[in-house]
Image: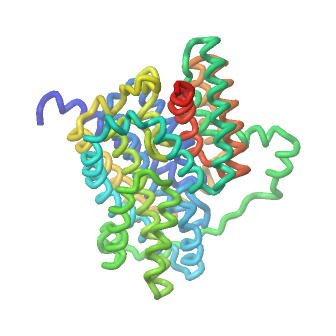
Amino acid sequence: MSAELIEPVLWAIGMAVLAGVLFTGIGLISGTDETAIVAPLALLVILIGVPPSGVIAFFLAAIISKHISHAVPTTLLGIPGDTTAVPMLREAQLLRSLGVPHIALQKAISGGVISVAIAVPLSIVFALVLTPFADAIGAAAPWIFIAAAVLVAYTSKGKLAAVAALIPFVLLIVGLQAFIMEQKEATFTTSFFLGIATGPLIFDLFSAVSPVGRRAMRQEGKREFNLAPDVRPRGDRRLLNPFKALSGKQLAYTSGSAAITSATFVFSPVAMAVLMGEVVGSRIKNGYERLTTVITVRNGTTESTYIAETLIPLIAIGLPLSPMAAGPAAPLFNAPPVYTLDAEAGTTNNLHDLLTTGQFALFSVIAAVIAIVIAYPFVMTNAHRAATWVMRSVSHEAIIAGFAALICVICLYEGGLLALGVTITVGLVGGLFNRMIGMHAGVQFMGYYVAVLTVPAILAL
């Protein structure tokens, strides 16, 4: 290893360890949405000056470890660990009813590990295939974004309502940007990102202040959860080998699904998890085998889609042309003043420009290996104890307060009270659209890029 590569590798190892430990714990907490949690922390890592190798390793280790540990509340408690865990709820509930939640957990996270091993190299290969067409894609970006925004909106829960809501949301972004330019001659990109990422949180905080909203949110007594018993066989070394935890058919279906979803990087991760589960489930007759295989494939798909939708746009194009890239991974593309994306000129200065394909491959492998080594054995052997501790000891209110404080600090750093006002405005409107019509953050991020890329292109015609 060359001397100039030693320092980036050490940064990658250190940040991957940090993310692996941090997000393995965060994933145990139900409802910790990836966009609202991963994006702000990735943005913070970038703004404090972590080198590119540490940034990409931190981000990939974060999503990989979180999508291993998010299976704990999903399978053992019957509540989704995050947004991408929602498609697994039905199978998780049925397997809990059969008295085998431990099997559901083992299958789900083993499928995730297998998918990581497949998605990392395939994503890099697909990125290399697209790289020769990067200039053409960049030139067509304004029109690609509007098409992608409509597609992502239609595949969300909101369907046509989400597509229609893109119009007022885009106009809101355009209007706020025009006002900001008049006052400060700045863009406040980070504040827009934070508003979109934490929209549901901001909306819920406003609802809690309102007497009407507070009545709807109030519940009598303490919230109760029924935790499945710990029936994991002690001393079974097969638990630490994902290849032995899955049957031959499950390995084949998971591998095939990971390969397909590593190529189809423009579609919603949740939609792909649902689709791949349905396709695989329709081919299996035995009920128990179908349930365990579907939950394996769906959790594997959450890993492969997140990895592919991050790496392919980063390596090949440098523009956030996927729901994932426009959502949780958005800071990797545009985090002024560190990483920038000039919408008018079509130029970038982000990880796409700062890392070679070989470096992406090296740091991605480092992140994947470290995240798996930290998260997989821990979840396999300590899931029940960890879930019990989280439900009894971790205050969700404290977590919300911590992230609210983090949002305020970042906004005030970028542009003072005006930037904070932008985040609150965008978050309140975006949270309303999310809660009321199912227009999730991925759709809203695509709407943001339509506002900064497509609208100027249309006006220039």
Would residue 322 appear left or right of 221 to someone viewing this image? left
> Residue 58 appears at what percent x and percent y?
38, 40
> Residue 191 appears at what percent x and percent y?
58, 27
* Of 371 and 234, the residue lying toward us: 371
Against 21, residue 414 (above or below) is above
Against 14, residue 291 (above or below) is below
Q: Residue furthest left?
A: 2
Instruction: Say which quarter of the image contains residue 427.
Output: top right
Question: Can residue 15 be seen from the camera position used here?
Answer: no
Would residue 43 appear left or right of 130 to someone viewing this image? right
Q: Coloring scheme of the render?
A: rainbow
Instruction: Say which quarter of the image contains residue 446.
Output: top right
**How many numbered circles does the render carry?**
0
Picture residue at 48% right of the left edge, 35% below the top: 142
Picture residue at 38% right of the left edge, 50% below the top: 307
Would residue 51 appear left or right of 6 to someone viewing this image? right
Instruction: Say which quarter of the image contains residue 241.
Output: bottom left
> Residue 414 appears at what percent x and percent y?
55, 19
* Of 264 and 332, the residue lying toward us: 264
Question: Can residue 258 be seen from the camera position used here?
Answer: yes
Quadrant that contains the N terminus: top left
Q: Residue furthest bottom?
A: 286
